[in-house]
């Protein structure tokens, strides 16, 4: 594949192939996470480290680098003949709540388009037997309550802002771009503080050198009635599917999708 995601990877067998010759210490950098890899007899040794500071602009790279002495190897015993590993990029394992960069009000009958970034997770997998060795996030996401205390749910709080329109900003390989359209059909003004992105219904794709999700259309119906969600599935020439949706087959569903200013004690 001509489009590059991981610098230093892809030796003619695919963009996500990591060559791990025996005896060579390699470093896979993914956002704020670092993984040192050493091929051993009957498996691999891995050591991991997460940076204290979140770096949303770091990409993914694979290179020669010795493990720091203060880190300890963990030995993974796997009967796999290949001296290489594969990388899978996946969306987080629960919905993600994101805040707009400024207060947003949409009158009844109006609509607006937004874009945000979703931090990705990385899975390290053996190539022949397809055994998952470990999974790491590109950044640590805190958990938060979305909705009221009685009926709300625990989701991830994204540090990525929701931007109006198709904002022209860089998309690092450790994140996916998600395009959102909000339609207000409630009969009153929509004034929201957070929007909940149901990542389990989204596929991942490579388009024009960046990772993107399916588009989402939210039709806000008012109050606690939830929103009608529909998905603009990606496809066509020049688009490569990386991961299918975790929950496939849905073209439309109803879910609570917005938190309102009156539900929060502060906006930050």
Image (cartoon, rainbow, N blue to C red):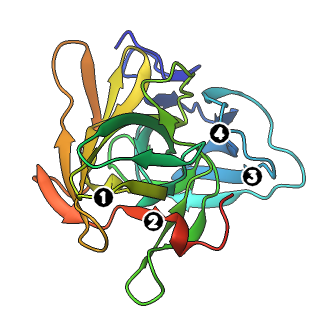
| Secondary-structure class at tag 1 | loop
| Secondary-structure class at tag 3 | strand
Residue receiving disc 1: 188
- Percent of width and height locating residue 232: 19, 36
In the image, residue 4 sits, relative to residue 130, either above or below, namely above
Q: Is residue 171 left or right of residue 32?
A: left
**Residue drawn at point x = 41 percent, y = 80 percent:** 152
- Percent of width and height locating residue 119: 53, 45
Residue receiving disc 2: 259
N-terminal label among 4 and 1: 4
Bin the neighbour count of mark 4 within 10 Å (Cα to Cα): few under 14, some 14-19, many 20 and up: many
The residue mark sitting in front, 4 or 1, is 1
Any mark on residue 49, and which?
A: 3
**Residue drawn at point x = 17 percent, y = 48 percent:** 230
**Residue drawn at point x = 65 percent, y = 51 percent:** 46
- Percent of width and height locating residue 76: 55, 59
N-terminal label among 2 and 1: 1
Q: Are marks 1 and 3 in contact (CB under 8 Å)?
A: no
| Secondary-structure class at tag 2 | strand
State the CA–CA distance, disc 1 to disc 3: 49 Å
N-terminal label among 2 and 3: 3
Any mark on residue 31, and which?
A: 4
In the image, residue 115 sits, relative to residue 156, either above or below, namely above
């Amino acid at each position: 594949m001509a489009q590059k995601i991981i610098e230093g990877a892809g030796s003619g067998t695919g963009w996500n192939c990591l060559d791990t010759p025996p005896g060579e210490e390699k470093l896979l950098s993914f956002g704020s996470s670092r993984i040192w890899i050493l091929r051993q007899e009957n498996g691999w040794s891995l050591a991991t480290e997460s940076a204290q500071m979140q770096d949303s602009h770091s990409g993914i790279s694979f290179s020669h680098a010795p493990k720091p002495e203060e880190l300890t190897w963990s030995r993974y015993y796997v009967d796999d003949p290949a001296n290489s590993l594969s990388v899978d990029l996946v969306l987080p394992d629960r919905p993600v709540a994101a805040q707009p960069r400024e207060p947003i009000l949409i009158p009844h009958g109006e609509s607006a388009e937004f874009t945000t970034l979703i931090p990705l997770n990385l899975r390290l997998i053996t190539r022949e037997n397809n055994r998952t060795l470990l999974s790491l996030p590109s950044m640590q996401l805190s958990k938060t309550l979305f909705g009221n205390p009685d009926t709300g749910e625990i989701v991830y709080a994204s540090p990525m802002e929701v931007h109006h329109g198709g904002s022209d900003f860089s998309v690092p390989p450790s994140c996916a771009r998600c395009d959102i359209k909000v339609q207000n059909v409630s009969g009153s003004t929509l004034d929201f503080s957070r929007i909940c992105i149901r990542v389990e219904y989204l596929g991942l794709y490579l388009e024009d050198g960046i990772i993107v999700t399916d588009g989402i259309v939210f039709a806000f119906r008012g109050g606690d009635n939830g929103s009608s969600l529909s998905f603009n599935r990606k496809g066509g020439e020049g688009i490569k599917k990386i991961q299918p949706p975790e929950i496939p087959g849905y073209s439309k569903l109803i879910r609570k999708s917005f938190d309102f200013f009156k539900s929060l004690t502060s906006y930050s």
